[in-house]
Image: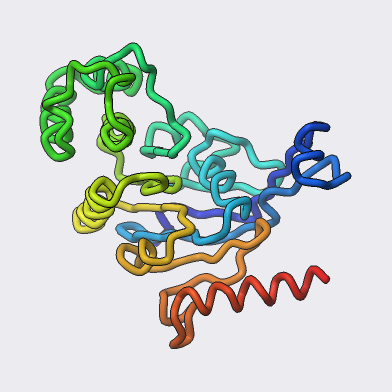
Amino acid sequence: MEPALSARGLRKSFKLSAKQRKLERTDVRVKTAVDGLSFDVAFGEVYGLLGPNGAGKTTTLRMLAALVKPDEGDAFVEGASVVSDPMRVRSRVGFLTSELKLEDAFSPDYLFDFFSELRGVDASSRDERKRALFARFGIDRFAQTKVADLSTGMKQKASLAVSLVHDPRVVIFDEPTNGLDVLTAKTVTDFLLELAAEGRTVLLSTHIFSLVEKVCDRVGVVIDGRMAASGTLPEVTGGRSLEDAFFDLYAARAGEAL
């Protein structure tokens, strides 16, 4: 059986502006964000990409969601290629990033309807799904409130609901609990577990060890755009804590670069 998600030799580089080179204190004009990354995610699995900031996690997820085209390699979502059939890929995934900013002037109710129309969701399905998601995340009380007047946590919950308007079987989350308060982070974490229990395929990126340990069936450790290790937690940790295993892998990568 083919995997739900598959990355095959993904590579992506970006040109650095003079300002970016100054900030990163480098003379390098081209930065390789993802360097030959390959991995599979099975149907109904929760797979976590764990790595430090700047490791290439976000770029990888954007390529898998067909939002960024790889320079080399390919990726597949339920058999659809991000290179040759990106529209089909986008129709099959729900993508959420902490960088997603909903328009301040609109309400969650309006935005849910707007994105439902973009996704081709019929009115009856839209209304039923809206009721369920808004009730699940406590958005119903703020459905007509402008996004600008919502708390940070409620904005994240609204973004989460909007990303799921079309009831996708494959969900891609970039740092889903980043910057959230403890209660909102728990709500999001619990929802990830619910998605897994429903048999959804979930791919997430994070730098939070506890999130991986709580929700992921398997984990890939990404360092400098490369896969340093991949497998179940026991396979990756070898009996150590995940934190210790990660830092050992990081130190080994640093040694290779010297």
Q: In this picture, is 57 found above or below 255? A: above
Residue 254 seen in the figure: yes
Q: Residue at x 40, y 38 (%)?
A: 96
Q: In this picture, is 250 found above or below 25? A: below
Q: Residue at x 41, y 60 (%)?
A: 47
Q: Quadrant of residue 135?
A: top left
Q: How many marks?
A: 0
In the visual, does 198 lie left or right of 226? left
Q: Quadrant of residue 44?
A: bottom left
| Quarter occupied by the N terminus | bottom left
- Residue found at the very far right of the displayed protein: 27
Closer to the camera, 230 or 137?
137
- Residue found at the very far top of the displayed protein: 105
| Quarter occupied by the C terminus | bottom right
Q: Quadrant of residue 140?
A: top left
Measuring from the top left, give residue 66's x and y in whole percent. Answer: 52, 36
Q: Residue at x 53, y 78 (%)?
A: 245
Closer to the camera, 157 or 132?
157
Q: In this picture, is 123 found above or below 156? A: above
Measuring from the top left, give residue 81's x and y in whole percent. Answer: 53, 42
Q: In this picture, is 193 found above or below 150? A: below
Measuring from the top left, give residue 240's x and y in whole percent. Answer: 46, 85
Residue 78 seen in the figure: no
Closer to the camera, 170 or 57?
57
